[in-house]
Image: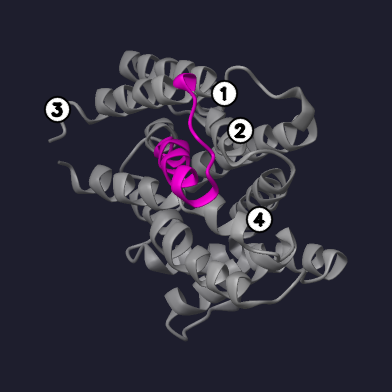
Amino acid sequence: MNKYYLILVIGGITFGTAAIFIRLSDLTPGMIAFFRFFIAGIILSRGRINLRKVLTQWKTGALLSAHMILFIASVYRTTIIDSTVLVSTSPLFSLVLAPLAGIKNSRKDVIAGVVAFVGVLIMNFPLNEGYLIGNVLAILSALTISMYTILLSRVKDEDPLTPAAYIYLMSSVFSLPIMILQGVGKINFYSLLSLVGLIVFPTLIGHTSVVYSSGHVKPQHIEVIGLLEPVVATVLAFPIFDQIPTLFEMLGGIVIILSILTLLWNRW
């Protein structure tokens, strides 16, 4: 398999742990977003921080910060499955926004994106209207991450870890005011353990896989492969939170996996 697609698949799987760690934590969205990106940025920068280059990533940093805070807030206001499924409508936004950024949609892009979106609809049927605010926040999170991925395709650097570090540090800057307003929440063993999990898996592995592959893989493809997140989250939510997946969630997950296989075809 093409190494960039393989890296994205691994990253997509780790994204599925995000909602689990967030639900286990008693920290505020601002606290999680700030420390998650700040610590990840420090680790990837390896102690070599160029402030000027950090500031050049203000657009990507702002979008990633907005995505993260909206997503975390949605997890607290709806079910894990609804949150991860709705945030995974991002491929549809990417299909619409990509041409505006000069990125063409091929027939395969459209087919994979539409099939993935159908899978998302199936997984989220019927939508729980009682969690309307959380669901809206998840959709806004999907919009911001699709904008981030498209903008990221223009970031060029010989060492992909360098822009990732600067993007994370810039995201922490935008997350800091939110943390100050919201406070830190409850600091306990599970919250700290969850924060470590969020830094290692969906951030250092997950988000960094996106930065590493951008420029080599279309944003539309990155978003479709990212749909492994709700599938993995649904599987993990069953043994951890006793959230038993419905027939629709299982069928939708199968459809999503088929859409990803469509993109991976001929790339083995």
Task: Give percent across and percent down for residue 187.
Answer: 70, 76
Residue 82, picture quadrant: top right
Tell which circle, 4 or 2, labels the residue nearer the N-terminal end: 4
Measured in 3D between alpha carbons, the distance from the residue under mark 4 to the one under mark 3, in whole angstroms, is 35 Å
**Which residue in the structure is indicated by mark 1?**
124
Q: Is residue 43 visible?
A: yes
Q: Main secondary structure of the magenta part?
A: helix
Instruction: Give me the disc on residue 65.
Output: 4
* Number of the front mark, 3 or 1: 1
Check contact, mark 1 vs mark 2: CB within 8 A. yes
Measured in 3D between alpha carbons, the distance from the residue under mark 4 to the one under mark 2, in whole angstroms, is 21 Å
Measured in 3D between alpha carbons, the distance from the residue under mark 3 to the one under mark 1, in whole angstroms, is 30 Å
Residue type at tag 3: Asn
Total labels drawn: 4
Identify the secondary structure beneath mark 2. Answer: helix
Q: Is residue 58 above or below residue 147?
A: below
Q: Between residues 29 and 177, which one lies in front from this camera angle? A: 29
Identify the secondary structure beneath mark 4. Answer: helix
Check contact, mark 4 vs mark 2: CB within 8 A. no
Measured in 3D between alpha carbons, the distance from the residue under mark 1 to the one under mark 4, in whole angstroms, is 25 Å
**Bounds of the magenta segment:** 226-248
The answer to if 266 sits in the magenta stretch is: no
Q: Between residues 248 and 140, which one lies in front from this camera angle? A: 248
**Which residue in the structure is indicated by mark 2?**
82
Task: Give percent across and percent down for residue 199.
Answer: 50, 67
Residue in the picture at 46% in, 78% down: 43
**Which residue in the structure is indicated by mark 3?**
266
Tell which circle, 3 or 2, labels the residue nearer the N-terminal end: 2
Q: Between residues 83 and 11, which one lies in front from this camera angle? A: 83
Residue type at tag 1: Asn
Q: Which image quarter holds the N terminus?
A: top left
